[in-house]
Amino acid sequence: MTVRKNLLKKIVVIATALAVALAPAAESAPKNVALKQITLITNDIAAEGMVVTSKAIVIYSNVVGNSADIQLRAIDFTGAQIWSKTIDSGRDEVATAISVDPQGSIWLGGNSAPAVASESDTAVIGALDPDSVTVENPAQLRADMKNTSLWQFSETGDLLEQIDSKATQPSLVEAISASATGVSVLLSRDTGQSLALVKAGVFEKEVKIGSAKSKFNIIFRTAGGSSSLFGSSSETLGGKRLAGRVDGILLKVSKSGAISKVVRSSATGATRDWQSATASNFLTGFVRSGRKIETAITKFNSTFAPTWTIRYPSTGKSLAASGVKGSVFAIFEPTTALKGVKGWKPRKGQSVVLEFDGKGRIINAFSDLLLSSPLSAGFSAEGGLIVLTTSGAILRSSTR
Protein backbone atom coordinates (compact mmCIF):
# COMPACT_ATOMS: atom_id res chain seq x y z
CA MET A 1 0.00 0.00 0.00
CA THR A 2 2.86 2.38 0.91
CA VAL A 3 4.61 1.67 -2.39
CA ARG A 4 1.42 2.43 -4.32
CA LYS A 5 0.93 5.73 -2.49
CA ASN A 6 4.49 6.79 -3.21
CA LEU A 7 4.08 5.89 -6.88
CA LEU A 8 0.89 7.93 -7.15
CA LYS A 9 2.60 10.84 -5.42
CA LYS A 10 5.49 10.74 -7.91
CA ILE A 11 3.07 10.65 -10.86
CA VAL A 12 1.22 13.71 -9.53
CA VAL A 13 4.48 15.61 -8.99
CA ILE A 14 5.75 14.77 -12.49
CA ALA A 15 2.43 15.69 -14.12
CA THR A 16 2.34 19.01 -12.26
CA ALA A 17 5.88 19.83 -13.29
CA LEU A 18 5.14 19.05 -16.94
CA ALA A 19 1.98 21.18 -16.89
CA VAL A 20 3.90 24.17 -15.51
CA ALA A 21 6.74 23.69 -18.01
CA LEU A 22 4.44 23.41 -21.01
CA ALA A 23 2.07 26.30 -20.12
CA PRO A 24 2.50 29.26 -22.53
CA ALA A 25 4.02 32.40 -21.03
CA ALA A 26 1.23 34.51 -22.55
CA GLU A 27 -1.26 32.91 -20.15
CA SER A 28 0.33 34.55 -17.09
CA ALA A 29 -1.93 36.80 -15.02
CA PRO A 30 -2.38 40.21 -16.70
CA LYS A 31 -1.29 43.36 -14.89
CA ASN A 32 -3.76 45.99 -13.72
CA VAL A 33 -4.32 48.91 -16.12
CA ALA A 34 -4.70 52.52 -15.05
CA LEU A 35 -7.85 54.39 -16.04
CA LYS A 36 -7.18 57.02 -18.73
CA GLN A 37 -9.27 60.02 -19.71
CA ILE A 38 -11.37 60.04 -22.85
CA THR A 39 -11.44 63.63 -24.09
CA LEU A 40 -14.10 65.83 -25.69
CA ILE A 41 -13.65 66.68 -29.37
CA THR A 42 -16.82 68.73 -29.86
CA ASN A 43 -20.49 68.97 -28.97
CA ASP A 44 -23.25 68.54 -31.55
CA ILE A 45 -26.62 68.39 -29.79
CA ALA A 46 -28.42 67.72 -33.10
CA ALA A 47 -26.37 64.58 -33.87
CA GLU A 48 -28.50 61.44 -34.10
CA GLY A 49 -26.00 58.96 -35.52
CA MET A 50 -22.37 58.62 -36.46
CA VAL A 51 -19.92 56.50 -38.41
CA VAL A 52 -16.11 56.67 -38.27
CA THR A 53 -14.07 56.34 -41.46
CA SER A 54 -10.30 56.15 -41.79
CA LYS A 55 -10.16 59.93 -42.23
CA ALA A 56 -13.20 61.47 -40.57
CA ILE A 57 -16.20 61.32 -38.25
CA VAL A 58 -19.45 61.54 -40.22
CA ILE A 59 -22.57 62.65 -38.35
CA TYR A 60 -26.17 62.89 -39.47
CA SER A 61 -29.13 64.79 -38.06
CA ASN A 62 -32.74 65.29 -39.15
CA VAL A 63 -33.92 68.86 -39.66
CA VAL A 64 -37.57 69.97 -39.78
CA GLY A 65 -38.53 73.07 -41.77
CA ASN A 66 -40.86 73.50 -44.73
CA SER A 67 -39.94 69.87 -45.33
CA ALA A 68 -38.10 67.24 -43.32
CA ASP A 69 -34.47 67.21 -44.46
CA ILE A 70 -31.25 65.38 -43.56
CA GLN A 71 -27.99 67.08 -42.72
CA LEU A 72 -24.73 65.16 -43.11
CA ARG A 73 -21.45 66.56 -41.74
CA ALA A 74 -17.88 65.31 -41.71
CA ILE A 75 -15.40 66.52 -39.09
CA ASP A 76 -11.76 65.63 -38.56
CA PHE A 77 -10.37 64.11 -35.36
CA THR A 78 -9.85 67.56 -33.82
CA GLY A 79 -13.49 68.56 -34.39
CA ALA A 80 -12.92 70.86 -37.39
CA GLN A 81 -15.54 70.59 -40.14
CA ILE A 82 -14.42 69.07 -43.44
CA TRP A 83 -17.69 69.26 -45.37
CA SER A 84 -21.44 69.55 -44.90
CA LYS A 85 -24.31 68.37 -47.14
CA THR A 86 -28.10 68.66 -46.89
CA ILE A 87 -30.53 66.20 -48.46
CA ASP A 88 -33.46 68.40 -49.48
CA SER A 89 -35.52 67.36 -52.48
CA GLY A 90 -38.51 69.48 -51.47
CA ARG A 91 -40.15 66.31 -50.14
CA ASP A 92 -39.81 64.85 -46.64
CA GLU A 93 -36.76 62.71 -45.90
CA VAL A 94 -35.50 61.21 -42.65
CA ALA A 95 -32.40 59.14 -41.82
CA THR A 96 -32.29 56.44 -39.12
CA ALA A 97 -29.10 54.45 -39.88
CA ILE A 98 -25.59 55.08 -41.19
CA SER A 99 -22.68 52.89 -42.25
CA VAL A 100 -19.47 52.94 -44.31
CA ASP A 101 -18.51 50.35 -46.92
CA PRO A 102 -15.02 48.86 -47.52
CA GLN A 103 -14.41 51.39 -50.33
CA GLY A 104 -15.03 54.33 -47.97
CA SER A 105 -18.48 55.35 -49.26
CA ILE A 106 -20.95 56.53 -46.61
CA TRP A 107 -24.42 54.98 -46.67
CA LEU A 108 -27.51 56.53 -45.09
CA GLY A 109 -30.72 54.58 -44.63
CA GLY A 110 -34.15 55.97 -43.88
CA ASN A 111 -37.45 57.00 -45.42
CA SER A 112 -38.72 59.53 -47.93
CA ALA A 113 -42.08 60.71 -49.17
CA PRO A 114 -43.15 60.07 -52.76
CA ALA A 115 -43.66 63.06 -55.00
CA VAL A 116 -47.12 64.62 -54.53
CA ALA A 117 -49.26 64.37 -57.66
CA SER A 118 -49.92 67.76 -59.22
CA GLU A 119 -53.49 69.11 -59.26
CA SER A 120 -55.13 68.35 -62.61
CA ASP A 121 -58.51 70.11 -62.12
CA THR A 122 -59.05 73.26 -64.18
CA ALA A 123 -59.24 76.36 -62.02
CA VAL A 124 -62.36 78.54 -62.24
CA ILE A 125 -61.43 81.99 -63.57
CA GLY A 126 -63.35 85.13 -62.76
CA ALA A 127 -65.70 83.72 -60.12
CA LEU A 128 -68.09 86.22 -58.57
CA ASP A 129 -67.16 87.47 -55.09
CA PRO A 130 -69.78 90.02 -53.96
CA ASP A 131 -68.64 89.92 -50.31
CA SER A 132 -64.97 90.51 -51.17
CA VAL A 133 -63.87 87.38 -49.30
CA THR A 134 -60.17 86.68 -49.48
CA VAL A 135 -59.65 83.04 -50.45
CA GLU A 136 -56.59 81.43 -48.87
CA ASN A 137 -54.72 78.77 -50.75
CA PRO A 138 -54.95 75.55 -48.73
CA ALA A 139 -51.64 74.10 -47.54
CA GLN A 140 -50.52 71.17 -49.61
CA LEU A 141 -50.93 67.85 -47.85
CA ARG A 142 -47.64 66.18 -46.95
CA ALA A 143 -47.35 62.64 -48.19
CA ASP A 144 -46.46 59.85 -45.78
CA MET A 145 -42.81 58.78 -45.86
CA LYS A 146 -43.55 55.31 -47.21
CA ASN A 147 -40.48 54.93 -49.39
CA THR A 148 -37.52 53.05 -47.96
CA SER A 149 -34.53 55.06 -49.14
CA LEU A 150 -30.75 54.68 -49.26
CA TRP A 151 -28.31 57.48 -50.02
CA GLN A 152 -24.69 56.78 -50.99
CA PHE A 153 -22.07 59.51 -50.52
CA SER A 154 -18.41 59.67 -51.46
CA GLU A 155 -15.71 60.33 -48.86
CA THR A 156 -15.80 63.98 -49.93
CA GLY A 157 -19.56 64.33 -49.46
CA ASP A 158 -20.79 64.00 -53.04
CA LEU A 159 -24.15 62.25 -53.45
CA LEU A 160 -23.42 59.24 -55.66
CA GLU A 161 -26.79 57.51 -55.67
CA GLN A 162 -30.26 57.44 -54.14
CA ILE A 163 -32.13 54.13 -54.12
CA ASP A 164 -35.86 54.04 -53.31
CA SER A 165 -38.27 51.21 -52.68
CA LYS A 166 -41.96 52.10 -52.77
CA ALA A 167 -44.18 50.42 -50.18
CA THR A 168 -47.79 50.60 -49.02
CA GLN A 169 -46.67 50.54 -45.39
CA PRO A 170 -43.71 52.50 -43.92
CA SER A 171 -40.77 50.47 -42.60
CA LEU A 172 -38.20 51.74 -40.13
CA VAL A 173 -34.61 51.22 -41.28
CA GLU A 174 -32.89 49.81 -38.19
CA ALA A 175 -29.44 49.13 -39.67
CA ILE A 176 -27.60 48.87 -42.99
CA SER A 177 -24.40 47.19 -44.13
CA ALA A 178 -22.78 47.52 -47.56
CA SER A 179 -20.16 45.43 -49.34
CA ALA A 180 -18.82 45.32 -52.90
CA THR A 181 -21.70 43.00 -53.84
CA GLY A 182 -24.60 45.08 -52.54
CA VAL A 183 -26.38 46.34 -49.44
CA SER A 184 -28.26 44.52 -46.68
CA VAL A 185 -30.99 46.53 -44.91
CA LEU A 186 -32.68 45.59 -41.63
CA LEU A 187 -36.31 46.80 -41.66
CA SER A 188 -38.89 46.91 -38.84
CA ARG A 189 -42.68 46.98 -38.92
CA ASP A 190 -45.32 46.32 -36.28
CA THR A 191 -45.57 42.73 -37.50
CA GLY A 192 -41.84 42.05 -37.18
CA GLN A 193 -38.60 42.54 -39.04
CA SER A 194 -37.33 41.73 -42.50
CA LEU A 195 -34.08 41.72 -44.41
CA ALA A 196 -34.01 43.68 -47.68
CA LEU A 197 -31.28 42.83 -50.19
CA VAL A 198 -30.11 45.51 -52.60
CA LYS A 199 -27.97 44.81 -55.66
CA ALA A 200 -26.88 47.08 -58.52
CA GLY A 201 -28.99 49.93 -57.18
CA VAL A 202 -32.24 47.93 -56.97
CA PHE A 203 -34.16 46.47 -54.02
CA GLU A 204 -34.17 42.86 -55.22
CA LYS A 205 -35.70 40.89 -52.39
CA GLU A 206 -37.23 41.26 -48.93
CA VAL A 207 -37.18 38.30 -46.54
CA LYS A 208 -39.26 38.25 -43.36
CA ILE A 209 -37.24 37.22 -40.28
CA GLY A 210 -39.51 35.83 -37.57
CA SER A 211 -42.38 37.76 -35.98
CA ALA A 212 -42.64 40.65 -33.54
CA LYS A 213 -41.20 38.25 -30.92
CA SER A 214 -37.75 38.65 -32.48
CA LYS A 215 -35.80 41.94 -32.47
CA PHE A 216 -32.48 42.28 -34.25
CA ASN A 217 -30.26 45.30 -33.62
CA ILE A 218 -27.19 44.79 -35.81
CA ILE A 219 -26.45 43.58 -39.33
CA PHE A 220 -23.21 42.86 -41.20
CA ARG A 221 -22.95 41.91 -44.86
CA THR A 222 -20.05 39.83 -46.18
CA ALA A 223 -18.33 40.27 -49.53
CA GLY A 224 -20.08 37.10 -50.70
CA GLY A 225 -23.54 38.57 -50.04
CA SER A 226 -24.56 36.68 -46.88
CA SER A 227 -25.66 38.63 -43.79
CA SER A 228 -25.20 38.18 -40.03
CA LEU A 229 -27.86 39.54 -37.67
CA PHE A 230 -27.63 39.89 -33.88
CA GLY A 231 -30.33 40.63 -31.31
CA SER A 232 -32.93 38.76 -29.23
CA SER A 233 -35.81 36.35 -29.75
CA SER A 234 -38.55 34.63 -27.77
CA GLU A 235 -39.71 32.34 -30.57
CA THR A 236 -38.41 29.36 -32.51
CA LEU A 237 -36.14 30.44 -35.37
CA GLY A 238 -34.34 28.16 -37.81
CA GLY A 239 -35.59 25.16 -35.85
CA LYS A 240 -33.90 26.38 -32.62
CA ARG A 241 -36.35 26.69 -29.73
CA LEU A 242 -36.48 29.22 -26.92
CA ALA A 243 -34.25 28.37 -23.93
CA GLY A 244 -34.79 31.32 -21.56
CA ARG A 245 -37.46 33.97 -21.21
CA VAL A 246 -35.81 35.84 -24.10
CA ASP A 247 -32.66 34.52 -25.78
CA GLY A 248 -29.76 36.42 -27.25
CA ILE A 249 -29.52 35.25 -30.85
CA LEU A 250 -26.97 35.14 -33.67
CA LEU A 251 -28.40 34.46 -37.09
CA LYS A 252 -26.78 34.00 -40.50
CA VAL A 253 -28.76 34.52 -43.72
CA SER A 254 -27.44 33.31 -47.08
CA LYS A 255 -27.23 35.59 -50.11
CA SER A 256 -30.45 34.00 -51.38
CA GLY A 257 -32.28 35.03 -48.18
CA ALA A 258 -32.46 31.64 -46.43
CA ILE A 259 -31.60 31.25 -42.74
CA SER A 260 -28.43 29.12 -42.74
CA LYS A 261 -27.35 29.21 -39.09
CA VAL A 262 -28.89 30.07 -35.71
CA VAL A 263 -27.06 30.22 -32.37
CA ARG A 264 -29.00 31.28 -29.29
CA SER A 265 -28.16 31.69 -25.60
CA SER A 266 -29.08 28.87 -23.25
CA ALA A 267 -29.59 30.59 -19.87
CA THR A 268 -32.81 29.12 -18.44
CA GLY A 269 -35.20 31.79 -17.15
CA ALA A 270 -32.95 34.67 -18.25
CA THR A 271 -33.59 37.60 -20.59
CA ARG A 272 -30.73 38.29 -23.01
CA ASP A 273 -30.14 40.65 -25.91
CA TRP A 274 -27.12 41.30 -28.12
CA GLN A 275 -27.10 45.09 -28.49
CA SER A 276 -23.92 45.85 -30.41
CA ALA A 277 -21.30 44.03 -32.47
CA THR A 278 -18.31 44.32 -34.77
CA ALA A 279 -17.73 42.67 -38.14
CA SER A 280 -15.31 40.26 -36.42
CA ASN A 281 -18.17 38.84 -34.30
CA PHE A 282 -17.30 40.63 -31.05
CA LEU A 283 -20.63 41.18 -29.28
CA THR A 284 -21.87 43.08 -26.25
CA GLY A 285 -25.31 42.79 -24.69
CA PHE A 286 -27.20 42.42 -21.46
CA VAL A 287 -28.25 39.49 -19.29
CA ARG A 288 -31.08 39.85 -16.79
CA SER A 289 -31.75 37.05 -14.32
CA GLY A 290 -34.16 38.01 -11.56
CA ARG A 291 -33.00 41.42 -10.32
CA LYS A 292 -29.42 40.89 -11.47
CA ILE A 293 -28.36 42.79 -14.61
CA GLU A 294 -25.01 42.24 -16.31
CA THR A 295 -23.24 43.27 -19.49
CA ALA A 296 -22.13 40.22 -21.45
CA ILE A 297 -18.97 40.61 -23.55
CA THR A 298 -18.19 37.72 -25.89
CA LYS A 299 -15.89 37.09 -28.85
CA PHE A 300 -17.25 34.54 -31.32
CA ASN A 301 -15.42 32.94 -34.23
CA SER A 302 -16.68 32.74 -37.82
CA THR A 303 -18.91 29.74 -36.98
CA PHE A 304 -20.48 31.58 -34.01
CA ALA A 305 -18.62 29.47 -31.42
CA PRO A 306 -17.50 31.58 -28.41
CA THR A 307 -13.73 31.93 -27.95
CA TRP A 308 -13.83 33.99 -24.74
CA THR A 309 -16.48 35.70 -22.64
CA ILE A 310 -16.82 37.85 -19.52
CA ARG A 311 -19.65 39.54 -17.61
CA TYR A 312 -19.85 42.70 -15.52
CA PRO A 313 -22.67 43.95 -13.23
CA SER A 314 -24.06 46.99 -15.04
CA THR A 315 -27.10 49.04 -16.01
CA GLY A 316 -27.44 46.91 -19.16
CA LYS A 317 -26.79 49.24 -22.11
CA SER A 318 -23.56 48.63 -24.08
CA LEU A 319 -21.67 49.31 -27.31
CA ALA A 320 -18.93 47.43 -29.17
CA ALA A 321 -16.16 48.65 -31.49
CA SER A 322 -13.12 47.20 -33.24
CA GLY A 323 -9.55 48.32 -32.53
CA VAL A 324 -6.16 47.48 -34.02
CA LYS A 325 -4.27 44.16 -34.11
CA GLY A 326 -7.36 42.20 -33.05
CA SER A 327 -8.25 44.39 -30.08
CA VAL A 328 -11.88 45.28 -29.32
CA PHE A 329 -13.70 47.85 -27.20
CA ALA A 330 -16.71 47.45 -24.89
CA ILE A 331 -18.51 50.55 -23.62
CA PHE A 332 -20.97 50.19 -20.74
CA GLU A 333 -21.95 51.55 -17.31
CA PRO A 334 -20.67 49.26 -14.53
CA THR A 335 -22.37 49.22 -11.15
CA THR A 336 -19.39 47.75 -9.25
CA ALA A 337 -15.62 48.10 -9.17
CA LEU A 338 -13.77 46.57 -12.14
CA LYS A 339 -11.18 43.91 -11.44
CA GLY A 340 -7.96 44.76 -13.25
CA VAL A 341 -8.70 48.51 -13.61
CA LYS A 342 -7.05 51.00 -11.27
CA GLY A 343 -8.75 54.34 -10.63
CA TRP A 344 -12.30 53.36 -11.56
CA LYS A 345 -15.17 53.92 -9.15
CA PRO A 346 -18.76 53.41 -10.32
CA ARG A 347 -20.71 56.65 -10.68
CA LYS A 348 -24.36 56.78 -11.76
CA GLY A 349 -24.65 57.89 -15.37
CA GLN A 350 -20.94 57.46 -16.16
CA SER A 351 -19.79 54.76 -18.57
CA VAL A 352 -16.38 53.19 -19.05
CA VAL A 353 -14.48 51.94 -22.10
CA LEU A 354 -12.54 48.67 -21.79
CA GLU A 355 -10.16 47.60 -24.54
CA PHE A 356 -9.44 43.85 -24.75
CA ASP A 357 -6.73 42.01 -26.64
CA GLY A 358 -7.39 38.94 -28.80
CA LYS A 359 -7.45 36.68 -25.74
CA GLY A 360 -9.91 38.75 -23.72
CA ARG A 361 -7.42 40.51 -21.43
CA ILE A 362 -7.95 44.18 -20.54
CA ILE A 363 -5.20 46.32 -22.08
CA ASN A 364 -6.74 49.82 -21.76
CA ALA A 365 -9.51 51.58 -19.86
CA PHE A 366 -11.00 55.04 -20.46
CA SER A 367 -13.72 57.19 -18.92
CA ASP A 368 -14.92 60.73 -18.27
CA LEU A 369 -17.92 62.43 -16.70
CA LEU A 370 -19.09 63.32 -20.22
CA LEU A 371 -19.17 59.64 -21.19
CA SER A 372 -22.85 59.26 -20.37
CA SER A 373 -25.52 57.38 -22.35
CA PRO A 374 -23.28 56.42 -25.32
CA LEU A 375 -25.18 56.27 -28.60
CA SER A 376 -22.63 55.20 -31.20
CA ALA A 377 -18.95 54.23 -31.39
CA GLY A 378 -16.31 53.68 -34.05
CA PHE A 379 -12.57 53.42 -34.44
CA SER A 380 -9.88 54.87 -36.68
CA ALA A 381 -6.18 54.05 -36.53
CA GLU A 382 -5.50 57.78 -36.75
CA GLY A 383 -8.26 59.04 -34.49
CA GLY A 384 -8.57 56.23 -31.93
CA LEU A 385 -11.92 55.27 -30.44
CA ILE A 386 -14.69 57.81 -31.10
CA VAL A 387 -17.91 57.81 -29.02
CA LEU A 388 -21.09 59.84 -29.60
CA THR A 389 -23.40 60.29 -26.60
CA THR A 390 -27.12 61.08 -26.59
CA SER A 391 -26.32 64.60 -25.34
CA GLY A 392 -24.23 65.21 -28.47
CA ALA A 393 -20.79 64.96 -26.88
CA ILE A 394 -18.23 63.46 -29.29
CA LEU A 395 -15.32 61.98 -27.37
CA ARG A 396 -12.00 60.48 -28.38
CA SER A 397 -9.61 58.07 -26.67
CA SER A 398 -5.86 58.24 -27.11
CA THR A 399 -4.25 56.02 -29.74
CA ARG A 400 -1.53 53.52 -28.90
Image: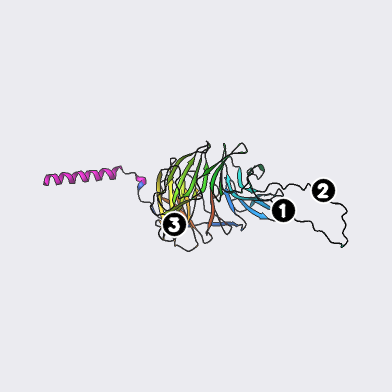
Amino acid residing under circle 2: Thr
For marks 1 and 2, give the one nearer the viewer.
Answer: 2
In the rendered structure, which amino acid carries the disc numbered 1? Leu
Q: Nearer the viewer, residue 255 or 221?
A: 255
Report the magenta residues as a range: 1-26
Categorize mark 2 by other alpha carbons within 10 Å: few (<14), some (14-19), many (20+).
few
As drawn, which residue projects farthest toward the left? Answer: 1
Residue indicated by mark 3? 34
| Residue 81 position in % (x across, y down) | 64, 52
- Residue type (three-letter) at the residue carrying disc 3: Ala
- Mark 3 to mark 2 CA distance (whole Å): 76 Å
Principal secondary structure, stretch drawn in magenta: helix
The residue at which mark 1 appears reads as 141
Using the rendered image of the protein, determine whether residue 386 is visible from the camera's viewpoint. no
Residue under the image location 82 percent in, 48 percent down: 122
Q: Residue at x 52, y 45 (%)?
A: 219
Residue 110 lies in the magenta stretch: no
Residue 267: horizontal and vertical position, in percent? 39, 51
Question: In the drawing, does residue 378 fall left or right of residue 81?
Answer: left
Residues at marks 1 and 2, CA–CA distance in whole angstroms: 19 Å
Circles 3 and 1 in contact, beta carbons < 8 Å: no
How would you rate the neighbour count of disc 3 (Cα within 10 Å): few for under 14, some for 14-19, many for 20 or more? some
Which colour assignment does the render follow? rainbow
What residue is disc 2 on? Answer: 122
Please give the label number shown on residue 25: none
Looking at the rendered structure, the secondary structure element under dot 1 is loop
Q: Earlier in the sequence, mark 3 or mark 2?
A: 3
